[in-house]
Image (cartoon, helix red, strand yellow):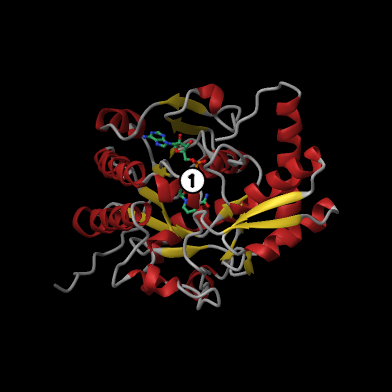
Amino acid sequence: MEQRKRVVEKDAPLKPDDLIVITGAGGFIAGNLALHFKRKGFKRIRAVDKKPLYEWYLHVPGVQNLSLDVSRAEACHRVCEGAAEVYNLAADMGGMGFIERNRVECLRSILINTHMVEAAWRAGARRYFFSSSACAYNTLRQQDPKVRALKESDAYPAMAERGYGWEKLISEMFCEEYWHERGLKTFIARFHNVYGPHGTWDGGREKAPAAMCRKMIEAMARKDFQISIWGNGEQTRSFMYIDDCVKGIDLITHCDALIATPINLGSSELVSINTLVGKVEKIAGKKLKRHYDLDAPQGVAGRNSDNTFIKQVLGWEPNTPLDQGLAITYQWIKEQYYNRMAGKRVGVG
Ligand SMILES: NC(=O)c1ccc[n+]([C@@H]2O[C@H](COP(=O)([O-])OP(=O)(O)OC[C@H]3O[C@@H](n4cnc5c(N)ncnc54)[C@H](O)[C@@H]3O)[C@@H](O)[C@H]2O)c1
């Protein structure tokens, strides 16, 4: 059935004392998002995560931090009360190793968005953001390392990543229908691998850039100068620096042309995992002996972000060069590693 177009009414611009709610804020991206809004001068930010407060990566001064499980409807209503805007980034997730081995946990994240979008709508929030993923794309289009970059229409016909990707796809659909049927302005970004400081770097949920930095630091500490790489290293990906990610979330959520319209938020700088390792070697100033673990999880053969649409709508795309972002990330992980060795508390995952 053809979708009837809903008229987009103008809403009031966000004021500094409007309440912004951010879920998953004990984690990487949402923690950095809370920091972004705080730096922009917003005074009322409610940050929520199920982790106990001492495990959060970032404690942003002046932000209300709540330790609540938003897969439960009651908690979502409490969290969304009085919100002008809601950013839902809470999910059980991790790198390839995690999402391939924990499909049930990933699928259960459906409860989070299902209850959060309903609670945001009931609370009368003006805008609702959902963090989707490139894993929502049809995996059959990602079987060659020399990929054609993924454009937004490549999600359908659907053949998403099992578990994690299907949860994202159906949550996207919830967001789209809350606009079409109920008039809540929803925004959906499909993130492509995000990296940077204050992210997971150890413990099994870390993604490739953090994992490669940590493995290099460990190899240097052990003085054996060896590294294990999942797969043959020819898999290709693009990696978006965290500052681009939070800027993109803000731009997307305040663009009425993007209501209920999934959009790529990722870098289009495609590299193989071998190239990524080479970049880490250059930063550390040390070449490592590479061992390839062909039985390890490796995900799709290649994946890149087609940024035609975001450039057209926002006149911008994530543009921090990988060399630059990786150098900052490497230093941050090194600091975490040696702090932990010195017996200090650090967040890992
Ligand atoms: N990091 C990436 O490269 C990437 C790529 C694609 C999509 N995403 C999406 O972006 C979002 C944020 O990812 P991230 O990298 O910051 O991950 P993260 O694991 O660092 O943060 C997610 C946070 O959500 C919290 N959470 C999980 N279940 C919860 C619940 N029931 N109630 C409250 N909090 C809960 C976790 O405790 C965690 O702190 C997720 O939705 C993720 O799927 C991330």
Residue 74: image location, x then y, percent? 26, 28
Q: Is residue 11 above or below residue 313?
A: above
Q: Foreground residue, 222 or 112?
A: 222
Write the residue at 76% across / 44% down.
219
Q: Amino acid at mark 1?
A: Gly
Q: Taking 126 as reference, is 114 left or right?
A: left
Tell whether circle 1 marks a residue whose Cβ is less than 8 angstroms from ligand 1: yes
Write the residue at 69% across / 46% down.
215
Q: Which residue is mark 1?
A: 94
Q: Is residue 27 above or below residue 8?
A: above
Q: Foreground residue, 123 or 340?
A: 340
Residue 273: image location, x then y, percent? 63, 62
Mark 1 lies on a secondary structure that is loop
Q: Please identify the quarter of the rendering in which residue 154 is found.
A: bottom left
Which quadrant does the C terminus fall into?
A: top right
Which quadrant does the N terminus fall into?
A: bottom left
